[in-house]
Amino acid sequence: MTMLCETCSKEFERTACPHCKEDVFRFGAYCYLCGGALAVEAPAGEETGEDDDFSRRVLCSDGACIGVIDERGICKVCGKPYTPESE
């Protein structure tokens, strides 16, 4: 079974939850079945380190989150899409 994002029509990624061991869609940082945190994997070729340019970071538009927005427009912490009007 595949599931498409209603905003961008991209297929949601599937992953195995490390807590309940179920195969789930990755809608955010947490499993929608058990609530456990899903493992966050860095995309291939992307390294995190001291050379990060903090001046180019876009903060999550959810006022309760401390995450930054990735290249796909999704918060790396809470998994919500960036909405500029929320600022």
Image (spheres, rainbow, N blue to C red):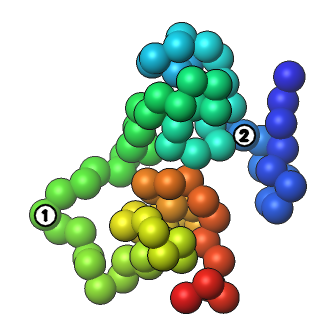
**Residue 24 falls in image quadrant:** top right
Relative height, residue 75 to residue 21 (above, below) = below
Tag nearer the camera, 2 or 1: 2
Assess disc 1: are there few (<14), some (14-19) or many (≥20) residues with their C-alpha within 10 Å of its C-alpha. Answer: few
| In this rendering, position of residue 49 left or right of residue 87 | left
Q: Position of residue 53 (x, y in %)?
A: 26, 76
Residue holding disc 1: 50
| Kind of residue indicated by mark 1 | Glu
The disc at residue 12 is 2
For residue 48, what is the image quadrant?
A: bottom left
| Mark 2 and mark 1: Cα distance apart in space | 31 Å
Residue 52, position as x, y percentages in the image:
23, 69
Badge 1 marks a residue whose secondary structure is loop
Residue at (46, 17) in percent of width and height? 19
Amino acid type, label 2 = Phe
Would you say 80 lies left or right of 11 here?
A: left
Q: Are marks 2 and 1 in contact (CB under 8 Å)?
A: no
Can residue 14 be seen here?
Answer: no
Q: Is residue 69 left or right of residue 85?
A: left
Residue 13 image point, x, y percent:
66, 35
Q: In this orientation, does residue 39 appear?
A: yes
- In this rendered view, identify the residue nearer to me: 51 or 3: 3
Q: Quadrant of the N terminus?
A: top right
Q: Residue 49 location, x and y as percent?
A: 18, 57
Q: Residue at x 52, y 21 (%)?
A: 17
